[in-house]
Amino acid sequence: MHINRRSFFKICAGGMAGTTLTLLGFTPSAALANIREYKLLRAKETRNNCTYCSVGCGMLIYSRGDGAKNAVSSIYHIEGDPDHPVSRGSLCPKGAGVLDYIHSEKRLKYPEYRAPGSDKWQRISWEEAFDRIARLMKADRDAHFQQKNAQGTTVNRWTTTGMLCSSAASNETGLLDHKFARALGILPLENQARLCHGPTVAALAPSFGRGAMTNNWNDIKNANVVMIMGGNPAEAHPVGFKWVIEAKTHNKAKVIVVDPRFNRSAAVADIYAPLRAGSDVAFLMGVVNYLLQHDHIQHEYVKAYTNASLIVSEGYRFKEGLFSGYDDATRQYDKTSWHYELDENGEAKRDNTLTHPRCVLNLLKKHASRYTPKMVSRLCGTSQDAFVTICQTLANTSVPNRTATFLYALGWTHHTNGAQIIRTAAIVQLLLGNIGMPGGGINALRGHSNVQGYTDLGLLAQSLPGYLPLPSEKQTTLEQYLQQATPVSPLPGQVNYWQNTDKFFVSLMKSFYGDNATAENQWGYDWLPKWDKSYDCMAQAEMMEQGKINGYIIQGFNPLAAFPNKNKAFRALSHLKYMVVIDPLSTETASFWQHHGEFNDVDPAKIQTEVFRLPSSCFAEENGSVANSSRWLQWHWAAAEPPAEALHDGKILGNIFLRLRELYRKEGGTAPEPLLAMNWNYTDPSNPEPEEVARESNGQALADIYDDRGKLLLKKGQQLNSFAELRNDGTTASACWIYAGSWTPEGNQMARRDNADPSGLGAISGWAWAWPANRRILYNRASADPQGKAWDPERKLIEWNGQRWQGYDVPDYPLTAAPEKQVGPFIMLPDGMGHLFALDKLADGPFPEHYEPMESPTGTNPLHPAQIHSPVVRIFPHDAATLGKADKFPYVATTYSITELFRHWTKHALLNAIAQPEQFVEIGVELAADKGIKAGDEIKISSQRGYIKAKAVVTKRLRRLTINDKQVDTVGIPCHWGFEGATKKGFLANTLTPSVGDANSQTPEYKGFLVNVEKV
């Protein structure tokens, strides 16, 4: 054998193959020469996170290239990171195929331009693209920018150009997006959250104080009951679903699935029950009624930690489907009566005996009493026996040492009452005492890798970073804004952490405008655009169709495939004067003007929109952080440069931004001050580095900072340690106050990789960094009883030691607040209580109520026939004409995702396209028999808005249900195919969906609409 010591160790470094007898020389030396070298032997290993769903799985990316100046890295292998505490080395089919996404033939490599009326792309240079885009934007801004409204109030807004932002780009790109848009005065600013988890924030924030997942992926293993409803994590979040199996295997947890379809989650459940899409509130209010009628609530928790005992205003009413204060002319509620009754000191009255007829608990009992098992079965189609079994299983967690966790996703958010569905689940969990507990919580399973981060950063029409509201035009001064944005506690001695709104806001203004923001100019308050109405995605489509939006910047978003009613979206885009698409891939939106036969039957010559298609980097080619569902900010590193001439998003935005500034400096124009005042002082302003933007998000001291006793806390220029150090006097800057602590004087906390779990509860505080303040379970004070001892000694998270709160998690509570002070555990709510009664924080009522989807298969509502639908549903007048009725469209349709594909991205990845090459629709066996349809037949699915065609999958997974004495079938429509990508061409599923939305979040109703099915 001809091998030296160095070669021997080189072989052994290759892994197990290096230890075989062949390689150790027990065969002729020729055999060694024929062995293929271990493919990762000379690779560069880079740590990253999957770009698809919000589990945030760890990835190891391997690339060739030695890092030399002229060497170009090439990614050639990706595998799961075994150290990652959530994924533990696993990847789902989407993640496993991500290499084909990175190297997709549909990756964009060069800037391209489509002239008005043209039928082709033409390649242009970056300089041409930047110059032309800046010119178009300036011309539109100069012509339509509004400095003052009719009342003479400074509003500094630009409403005729909109911007859609990615939900998979990094937080650092997100902050640049926000600064870019607000500096220009853009109000129509949105991200993917509007179309997916918008109702999550609208529901969870009024219930508990924050609009995010209460617990985390690992914590699911601690549950005794896992309630999966409104989601299908086995298919949509497969690696995260491992923790459900962990609970089932090691904790003997009961898994319940309630879904219109017997899906892959249901396949491993202990209990499955079908229900009609759009009837979720009825089901969950039935659970509330069962718990109250059978006294299965955790009394001590409910009395101490919820607003059950607080007395509601005498004017509050609910009658025949309407809450008090409804105005039929405006289709809105006057919410004055949705408040507590106050005493002479302005404090909420309470009845600790829970006997007062207007205390919250008794009002809830009365409201829920109509949702009997019989009524639930009538509305949902679920059998009474199955429903009662589920109620009993959940009721078993009303004791201190058992918990249930709720897992949901778009099956709850994609309804006109999506926020109220989630609100109902919050009520259930508060009654059971499951919020703040290990193994408890309401866990929103976010769909995109950084949709949580983009929501945190306020990339929505009426938001600012850190869940601060964007001022309206009615808030003419900073003083007025702060007065209205800062809540007053109705109970004494509560934390009411939003009382610090002035510190958060002023620090944001100092981050935005730097030295330009002073006390004399209200910290730059007038430079912020002031809204007059909502400019959400549905409003944007409406405005475009009416010719009120001329320009559109679309970054990592595919509105033609994502907006409700694809045909309306097409008409909207066709009315634009110019559109800029920034994306790694070729999307249907960028090519909306192209004729693709029946899939996109348009005439390019009639479409005068000027389109720019700009190639950007993907996740594997950028440094930065993304926030997964668990609120973990995880830092990832670039393994290669973008292909060919593609650029990082920040560099594209930076170049456009600088060109606009230069044009205004040289030529003047309308209201240049807000644009020129924005702080863009990066090392290279045309290409801001993610690290410096991350430090900006965290924030720093702008002067020496002292505490109340004169002790120096921070020197000028130091990074902040936490948001507790923020000041309202202009001496601190923080672009996103909830991210303060993510990059401290000790460095990048998001890059930490300690996966130790000393408690065994999944409170892994050393991996990455979780907002707020690195807490892994929100509201964790509620995991201990009123005396400060853990409800469950076997799952001890934090406890009072006589002097302070301590434990395995960062207490979500003042560290030295003794139990006898009776400070509520929900510190972000003014009263410190979990809200069974939501007060005036939702548009459609303080209690949830079942309303029919806007397209109802029965056309009535047995609870109140005079009020069938939500009275405050979001709908534009002419969209009402596009709603169908059951006589022509008798079947209920619901959309969903499948394991192998992710929205409209992975159809570009060859491996995933091979796994699911062709569009299909699922129908039940009874409907198939009635229609004479067999598996594999081509069928036509039509709604009032249009049609699609697909192959039929005939399945028992979709049952025929009896709804209000009428048999109703469900049609299942996966939403992945289109006319771009590596799969066979298909129809966009949103061709069928109605343009109606949730009253609180304006999220469209992609589920529970009506269709007809025909064999082609």
Image (tube, rainbow, N blue to C red):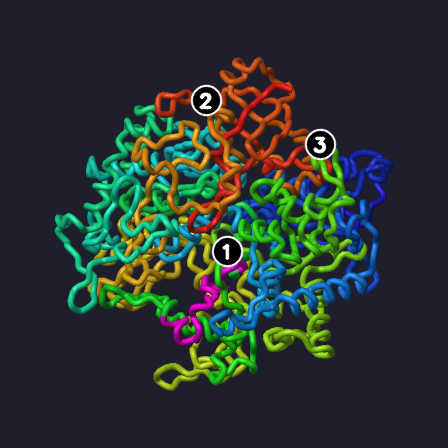
For the C terminus, the image quarter is: top right
- Residue 463 among magenta residues: yes
Horizontal and vertical percent for residue 531?
Answer: 50, 64
Q: Residue visible at 69% across and 78% down?
A: 668
SS at mark 3? helix
| Foreground residue among 263 and 95 | 263
SS at mark 2? loop
Q: Give the range drawn in magenta.
A: 459-483
Which residue is label 2 attached to?
A: 959
Residue type beneath disc 1: Trp
Horizontal and vertical percent for residue 739?
Answer: 49, 65
In 3D space, how far apart are the residues under numbered discs 1 and 3 (Cα atoms)?
Answer: 44 Å
SS at mark 1? strand
| Foreground residue among 565 and 682 | 565
For the N terminus, the image quarter is: top right
User: Residue 700: in sight, yes or no?
Assistant: no
Residue type beneath disc 3: Glu
Residue type beneath disc 2: Arg
Q: Which of marks 1 and 3 is nearer the N terminus?
A: 3
Which residue is label 3 attached to?
A: 598
Q: Residue visible at 64% across and 45% down?
A: 571
| Foreground residue among 617 and 882 | 882
Neighbor class of circle 2 (other Cα within 10 Å; few <14, some 14-19, many 20+) is: many
The quadrant in which residue 273 appears is top left
- Residue 839 among magenta residues: no
Horizontal and vertical percent for residue 123?
Answer: 83, 54
Instruction: Say if 825 sits above or below 893 in the image.
Output: below
**Proximity of marks 2 and 1: CB atoms separated by less than 8 Å:** no
Which residue is label 1 attached to?
A: 632
- Outermost residue to the right: 30
Side of 355 relative to 866 (left or right): left
In 3D space, how far apart are the residues under numbered discs 2 and 1 (Cα atoms)?
Answer: 39 Å
